[in-house]
Image (cartoon, rainbow, N blue to C red):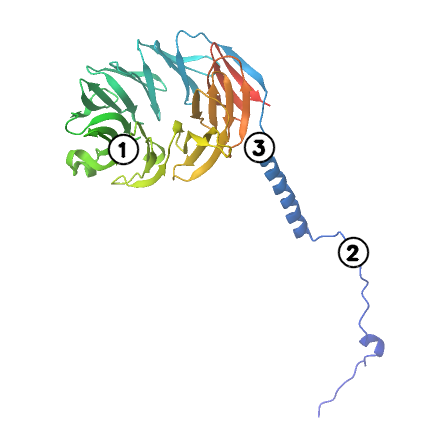
Amino acid sequence: MEEFKIVKLPTKEENKEEDVPVEKTDDNYQPPKKKHIFLFLIFLFVIIGVMVIRIITTYTDYEVVNKWDRKETSESSYCNFKNNLLKYSCDGVFYTTYAGNLIWNYTYDMTNPNMDICGDYVIVYDKKGNEIDLFNSSGFVKTITCTTPIIEAKVAKQGTMALLLQENGVSHIQLFDKSGTTLVSGEFHPENRGFPVSIALSSDATRLLMSVINVDQGELSTELVFYDFTNAGKEEQDNIIASYTYVGMLVPKIDYVDKDKVIAFGDSKIIIFNNNLKATMAKEIPVDNVKSVFYNDKYFGFVKEATAEDGSVVNELNVYNLFGFKWMSKEITDSYEQISILDNNEILLNDNGKIAIYNMQGFKKFEYDFGERIYTVLPGNTHKKYYLIEENKTEEIYIK
């Protein structure tokens, strides 16, 4: 039998639980994790508040940060090109920094100069004239002289040019590469297909869209004809991959936009087409009483006449994204001669020097009457900085 050796018997005091002192806690104490979450939420609310204030604030004054004098020789048009200033007029093209430092220039003699830009290339052509000039950011590339008047011209990102030419009721479509070599040539007679009024060229020059007006027994219609110059298009008759006819509607403006989607502006519909093999229709937006349209590679919009609740006629500003969904609709009281969408996706209304700028949320961001002619306004690198292209000077301003 095993023996048990008892070393020590527990006493009553040893069986009692030892009293552990409890620290008194502060009623406002929070565990570190909860405190971090609380601080993050405060920071988030501050950021949201700043953004809301930034969106809804209207600025009515400005200060001039820099000013550069210019000399105008004739009526000029301006745009941003590769973060510099491109000016074209009847006399020629001038490419400068915003400070006015000349990068390059080219002179010509045109009566009605028009311009198109894609990627690194720019064309200037004399509408109803015979000259078209191709440029890139380094300067002059090529001149093409046509024997038939130019109605419209487009350029692709590799310098390919598409021309719509018309004379004596006969229309011609021609594509040239940047060296001036003819790539495509076609002739259209009104009795066969109709009367082309506008063309659009995809960014890679593989597709061409033509808007053709037809009048049959007094009834007007527009046919949108899609051409494809790739191997897939060669399998189709005359390279036509799709065509859409709209009875009773005029479509004077068409263009390829972001990722070579197509947008067509009609007098009763705005239509978006997909960039796929058959150029299928993505969205139709009914419109009426349209006064002006504008677009870029992210949004498009229009101003229309609408009837207010009191029965008065007002201007209504509408903006959509390229999927055809309405982004905003806003009644505006501003008068304007020009309306455009800026590179920063703000809407500019220009009434001979009286400027109004709206953001994409429908709030008026800036309003000021400069009391002198403003050719255009270009956004700067911060949300309050702009460049004013005025009659004889360029001003860098900061709105406040």
Q: Residue furthest bottom?
A: 1
Q: CA distance from mark 2 to mark 3?
A: 45 Å
Residue at mark 2 to residue at mark 1: CA–CA distance: 81 Å
Of pointers 1 and 3, the one earlier in the residue sequence = 3
Q: Secondary structure at mark 2?
A: loop
Q: Is residue 172 at all visible to an observer of this figure?
A: yes
Which residue is denoted by mark 2 in the rendering?
Answer: 25
Residue topped by disc 3: 56
Q: Looking at the figure, which quarter contains the C terminus?
A: top right
Q: Relative to 366, does residue 111 appear above or below in the rendering? A: above
3D distance between C-alphas at marks 1 and 3: 42 Å
Residue 117: x and y in percent read: 35, 23
* Residue 70, x across and y down, in percent: 46, 9
Residue under label 1: 248
Q: Earlier in the sequence, mark 2 or mark 1?
A: 2
Q: Residue 146's image quarter?
A: top left
Q: Given the image, on which type of amino acid does mark 3 rest?
A: Ile
Instruction: Tell me which amino acid carries mark 2.
Output: Thr
Q: Quadrant of the N terminus?
A: bottom right
Q: Seen in the image, is 120 located left or right of residue 208?
A: right
Please state which amino acid type lies under the numbered disc 1. Answer: Gly
Q: In the rendered view, does 15 fall on the left or right side of 335?
A: right
